């Protein structure tokens, strides 16, 4: 890897909008995803993190389960040692994986060690289920120990999350892959409410009710798969899935702005109010995504057209976390506004 230096063709991070959380923290309105899946090596993802910080990204979305936090940690150390970027200018998120719900502090300490940091800006419970699945497994794979959502258990996990704030290891805590009924119970019982909720959000899966619920409760939505994860592995694709970047509205705006349709998805997300965390290892792509939020807004008319193209098309269905053989993925998502019983 080349030595870290701010890129000449980058974006001034001060031009990138920020959102203020209920805790008072300010989070950049776009981040870089770091899940390389089986398409990119850990080193390639770490190199992209370094390149992204060089061009002006100040928000990086990590997770222990992505397997690459130690590689990314080497980049953070190099960046911070260079003195070009200060720790309080960077926003780093990590997540506790499903097999560590009863050892949250240990998981956080491991992420901090791997990332070579002494605090995280945001720590999330990656999934509200403690269910394990083998890396790269087929969607029909089930863990024999898999469980339904059990609120009492989740609150025990959440209490450990709260203790991280009290210990000064993390500034903010949050959730991911939740639903409205689960969030209502959590909000009823918390000492510290989530600052952010990471959820799948792209033009064909806008989750309008849950998005509004988060906004009404001052929980900042962070949108994953903001481009509709067009190159995700085949095992994560279903015949009924639609392709956001092929949508005529997205393509029409892309043509007007002379950008790739992926960039339009990112711009829409920021203008709507969720924080997109697009992934790419290619400089032209991650720079284009960042640049897009600093200029050429989508018009009000185009924003209205976006609200007509939602197809309720969930891509990350989570089948591997189901706890019964005869269930379908819908059981994970409480579609009747009630938590699916055990
Ligand atoms: N909390 C959770 O449970 C959860 C779940 C899933 C994801 N995430 C997070 O969300 C991040 C993003 O999700 P994702 O990677 O699945 O999907 P995504 O960001 O929607 O799509 C990423 C793909 O879009 C393409 N792309 C990106 N920018 C582009 C541009 N400007 N022009 C053309 N193509 C572009 C790239 O394809 P090529 O590589 O082919 O160029 C890239 O691999 C992850 O990395 C992870 O950090 C969180």
Image (cartoon, rainbow, N blue to C red):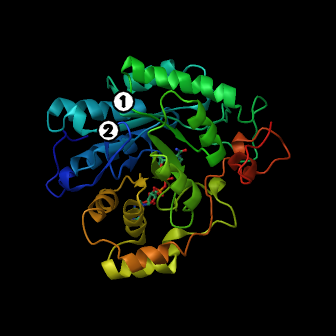
Q: Quadrant of residue 53?
A: top left
Above or below, 273 against 148 in this view is: below
Q: Measured from the top left, where is residue 256 in percent x and y? A: 34, 82
Number of the label disc, if any, that sits on residue 182: none
Q: Could you say whether the residue bearing mark 1 is in a helix, strand or loop?
A: loop
Q: Measured from the top left, where is residue 271 in percent x and y? A: 37, 64
Ligand 1 closer than 8 Å to label 1 CB: no
Q: Measured from the top left, where is residue 179 in percent x and y? A: 62, 47
**Other residues around mark 1 within 10 Å, as few (<14) / some (14–19) / many (≥20):** some
**Other residues around mark 2 within 10 Å, as few (<14) / some (14–19) / many (≥20):** some
Q: Earlier in the sequence, mark 2 or mark 1?
A: 2
Q: Which residue is nearer to you in this view: 264 or 37?
A: 264
Distance (Cα) linking label 2 and label 1: 8 Å
User: Is residue 207 visible to the viewer in this orientation of the structure?
Assistant: no
User: Is residue 328 visible to the viewer in this orientation of the structure?
Assistant: yes
User: Disc 2 designates what residue?
Assistant: 25
Q: Quadrant of residue 184?
A: top right
Q: Residue at x 51, y 75 (%)?
A: 246
Quarter placement of the C terminus: top right
Residue farthest to the right, as pictured = 326
> Are discs 2 and 1 less than 8 Å apart at CB?
yes
Q: Which residue is nearer to you in this view: 287 or 165?
A: 165
**Horizontal relation, residue 35 to residue 3: left or right:** right
Q: Which residue is nearer to you in this view: 87 or 175?
A: 175
**Horizontal relation, residue 257 to residue 159: left or right:** left
**Horizontal relation, residue 147 to residue 162: left or right:** right
User: Disc 1 designates what residue?
Assistant: 171
Q: Residue at x 68, y 31 (%)?
A: 151
Q: Measured from the top left, where is residue 110 in percent x and y? A: 45, 22
């Amino acid at each position: 890897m080349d030595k870290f230096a701010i890129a000449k063709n980058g974006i001034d991070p001060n031009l990138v909008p920020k959102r203020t959380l209920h805790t008072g923290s300010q989070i950049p309105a776009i981040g870089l995803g770091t899940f390389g899946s089986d398409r990119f090596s850990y080193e390639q993802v770490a190199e992209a993190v370094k390149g992204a910080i060089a061009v002006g990204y100040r928000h990086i979305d990590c997770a222990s389960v992505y397997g690459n936090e130690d590689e990314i940690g080497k980049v953070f150390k190099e960046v911070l040692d260079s003195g070009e970027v200060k720790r309080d200018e960077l926003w780093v998120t990590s997540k506790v994986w499903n097999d560590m719900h009863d050892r949250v502090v240990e998981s956080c300490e491991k992420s901090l060690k791997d990332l070579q940091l002494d605090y995280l800006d945001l720590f999330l419970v990656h999934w509200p289920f403690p269910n394990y699945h083998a890396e790269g497994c087929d969607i029909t794979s089930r863990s024999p120990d898999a469980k339904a959502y059990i609120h009492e258990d989740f609150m025990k996990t959440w209490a450990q999350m709260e203790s991280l704030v009290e210990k000064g290891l993390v500034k903010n805590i949050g959730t991911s892959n939740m639903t409205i009924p689960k969030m209502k119970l959590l909000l009823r019982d918390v000492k510290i409410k989530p600052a952010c909720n990471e959820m799948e959000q792209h033009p064909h899966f806008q989750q309008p009710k849950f998005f509004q619920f988060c906004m009404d409760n001052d929980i900042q939505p962070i949108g994953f798969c903001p481009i509709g994860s067009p190159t995700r592995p085949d095992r994560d694709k279903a015949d009924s899935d639609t392709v956001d970047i092929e949508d005529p509205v997205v393509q029409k705006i892309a043509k007007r702005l002379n950008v790739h349709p992926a960039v339009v998805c990112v711009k829409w997300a920021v203008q709507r109010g969720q924080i997109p965390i697009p992934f790419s290892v290619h400089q032209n792509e991650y720079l284009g995504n960042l640049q897009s939020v600093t200029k050429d807004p989508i018009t009000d008319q185009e924003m209205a057209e976006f609200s007509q193209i939602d197809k309720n098309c969930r891509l990350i269905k989570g089948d591997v976390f189901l706890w019964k053989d005869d269930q379908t993925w819908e059981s994970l998502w409480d579609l009747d506004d009630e938590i699916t019983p055990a």
